[in-house]
Image (cartoon, grey):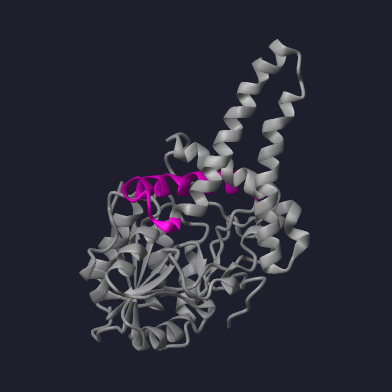
Amino acid sequence: MSMNKPVISVVIPALNEEKVIGRCLASLAAQHIGPDQFEVIVVDNGSLDSTVAIARKFKSSLNLSVLEKKGSHVSAVRNLGAATARGQFLAFLDADCCAPPDWLGQAITLLQAGDGGVMGGYHSIPNPSSWLARAWYGDLSKRKQGPVSYIPCGTLLISRSVFNKVGGFDETLQTSEDFDLCQRIGAAGYQVLAYPALSTVHLGTPQTLRTFYRQQQWHGRGVRTVFLRDMLHPGFVKTFLLTGYTLFWTIASLLAIPIAITAYNFYLLVVGPAFLLFGATAMALRDAAQRRRFGLVFPLTILYLVYGLARCVSLLGRGRGRNARSVAPSLTGVHATTAPGCRSVNAPLS
């Protein structure tokens, strides 16, 4: 490890990431800034595959440390990396994200000019990506600019002193630790800012309805926990209006079945589904209008229906208890030591 104190420390939590960790670290090895200006800390959460072995191969090209913290929430894993970090700034990067070559250089410039609060970029999608990824996530990194409610933890940057001041990530949270941290940062008087130039390519972008549902149900578990702490927070309004609406009409649809059979009025069977479709279509139309891409109305309608169902399951405390990594099909099984294939289809940043 370099004896010089780095300007920024990149913290990467990892759990069974052998399919993507090589690409992530290769993108950091290709950064335009000097290797003495940053360090990389991989914190393994008990991987059973080749994650650690692949990561250690980069010790010759990166100022790299590999730590271990088994069986913990990812919030605790991130905190361990932050506690070990020597840089003035912290960059939290997920193992399935690839950074453009000027990512750290731009991050340092923006962090040095900022107030120490959170900044980062929303993820870009890999190339190729499915209709689902393009519809839901495709231009998100461009649309999210300036003050935002939160920055996703896969690409989150902050002053180490401010991070320590607010107590780091809440280790009781299984997910949504990024949202919780950003709310506490904002409450402490610091900014939370999104910059498209700080976007990274998310190799784990959901590409199928199954993985999209699982991801939304997983994230919903954390939102539910944070929501129960502060039910009046404006950041929850959209999610819980849609979730409540979906839950009500889903229950109404189920209750209508025995009533329709008993009353021989089978028109009752279409009322609940019609309102579910109406709500999802309204949300899809709003998003398509904002993005000026009305061809997205149909796919967004499908995705809002799935999103609402997933969040309903989370609200009721049901569903899977652990996130499953979703990897773009073209990247599955690739243990890359260079960074080809990490470019975004919508925002070439290099």
| Front one among 87 and 118 | 118
Figure check: 101 above or below 154:
below
Q: How far from the left and from the top, in percent, is residue 319?
A: 48, 36
Q: Can residue 57 be seen in this view?
A: yes
Q: Is residue 231 magenta?
A: yes
Q: Does the magenta stretch include residue 207?
A: no
Figure check: 70 above or below 314:
below
Which residue is rendered at x = 67% and y = 32% of the image?
A: 272
Q: How far from the left and from the top, in percent, is residue 339?
A: 56, 73
Tell whether 343 sits left or right of 185.
right
Tell whether 6 sits left or right of 104.
left
Q: Can residue 209 be seen in this view?
A: no
Which residue is rendered at x = 68% and y = 38% of the image?
A: 275
Quadrant in which the C terminus appears: bottom right
Which residue is rendered at x = 63% and y = 48% of the image?
A: 304
Q: How far from the left and from the top, in percent, is residue 124?
A: 58, 68
Chief SS of the magenta region: helix
Magenta-colored span: 208-235
| Front one among 287 and 331 | 287
| Front one among 3 and 5 | 5
Which residue is rendered at x = 50% and y = 37% of the image?
A: 313
Tell whether 1 sits left or right of 276.
left
User: How many numbered dots are placed on residues in this image?
Assistant: 0
Quadrant in which the N terminus appears: bottom left
Figure check: 158 above or below 46:
below
Quarter of the image where one finds residue 196: bottom right
